[in-house]
Amino acid sequence: MDTHRDAHVAAVLSLVGEVIGTAEFPATAAGYRDLLGWARGMGTVRRAGVEGTGSFGAALSRYLLAQGVDVFDVNRFDRADRRRRGKSDPLDAENAARAVLSGRARAQAKTGDGPVEIARMYKLAKDSAVKARTQAINQLKAVLIRADPQLREELAGLGNAELFRTCARLVDDSLNHEADEGAVLHATHITLCLLARRIGQLSEEIQDLEGRLTQLVDRHAPQLLAVVGIGPDTAVTLLITVGDNPERLGSEASFAALCGVSPVERSSGSRQYRRLNRGGDRQANAALHRIVQTRLRVDPRTQEYYERRSKEGKTRREIVRSLIGDTRPGRSSTWSDQCSRHLRYRGSRET
């Protein structure tokens, strides 16, 4: 399927790759039913390739999975190939179907119907609130730079928490004085007050969302929080990467590739070399990096490993890479592997 905001285009192929039919359906609940009914009218539907399973095709993927159809995520096709062959929605739908039929598309779509999807929505709201609060704090401090010297001196030396509380009371305090509505100082008071109150509201929102995320992790993946170096935010990031159906990851190697920490061959001639994968989910990659950095500070076993590898002549960068995802042949267990086992254990226990 080639998915869009308002309509989806589907193409049905036979087992030998012949195009049986192509049609367009609205992106609605009735449209999903009509699409599957139309496809099943041509034969048994076992597998489907969907472009954009995390965006326009998310709802369609959930519906197909609920109806017993195996859904595979199809990546956007090469732009150079599209320039040569042309582009249209029916052609994109046909290419998606061929990707599944040929085995090129092997990544199963996330179900998006469980606690991980709930955590993803909460984290989305939290991240946007954190970004908005940071912007408001920067704006408040920028206003102070241009403020009246007397006001700036009164607020100088205050910590952030006390500064925001003081600024939030500026308008109420100024009401005791007959301030001129057109005065710059009065406008500065109002601006600082509004920004400080916005910061307070966003802080309460962030705190509430953090509590909800912690409860979700405590309930559905407590084994992650038991590991040194993994907090609720890092655990949620890893859970979102895996999804509500961790069984789609068959091994530690598949999770490492998903997080961009799998070894990639870079050998040429007599030079045998491997590097870490630069693809994958960068948020999960950053989460694994934070785990390793935290354990280097507080975990004795990780510190002992660091000292031993340092004596072997390894740099800090090489040691961190080895801890995240070792690129050596016959590599030992890394934090990517251990997180994968914890996450797949969650799936097997819930099912």
Image (tube, rainbow, N blue to C red):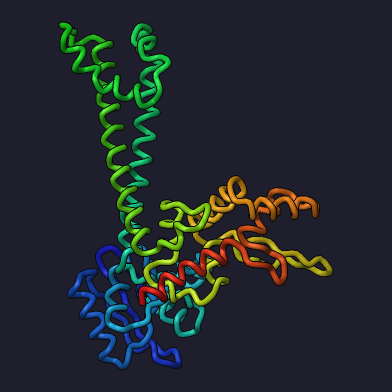
| Residue 23, quarter of the rendered image | bottom left
Q: Residue furthest front?
A: 300
Q: Which residue is drawn at 16% across and 9% down?
A: 176
Location of residue 302 in the rendering, given as x and y in whole percent from the top left corner: 64, 54
* Location of residue 177 by image quarter: top left
Q: Is residue 254 left or right of residue 197?
A: right
Q: Position of residue 280 (x, y in %)?
A: 52, 62
In the image, residue 273 sits, relative to residue 21, either above or below, namely above
Q: In this view, does 340 lie above or below 13?
A: above
Position of residue 247 measured from the top left corner of the image (x, y, whole percent)? 44, 76
In the orientation shown, which residue stands out farthest toward the right?
270
What quarter of the picture does the C terminus occupy?
A: bottom left
Does residue 192 show up?
no
Left or right, 17 with respect to 43, comes to: right
In this picture, residue 227 sits left or right of residue 118: right
The answer, for residue 200, to whether it is visible in the render is yes
**Nearer-the-camera pick, 66 or 71:** 66
> Above or below — where is 103 with respect to 311?
below
Q: How many marks?
A: 0
Q: Which residue is drawn at 24% across and 85% down?
A: 38
Q: Which of 15 and 340 is in front in this view?
A: 340
Q: Nearer the viewer, residue 320 or 82?
A: 320
Q: In which quarter of the image is the N terminus?
A: bottom left
Position above or below: 312 against 63: above
Q: Nearer the viewer, residue 62 or 130?
A: 130
Residue 333, x across and y down, in percent: 63, 67
Residue drawn at 67 percent across, 59 percent down: 322
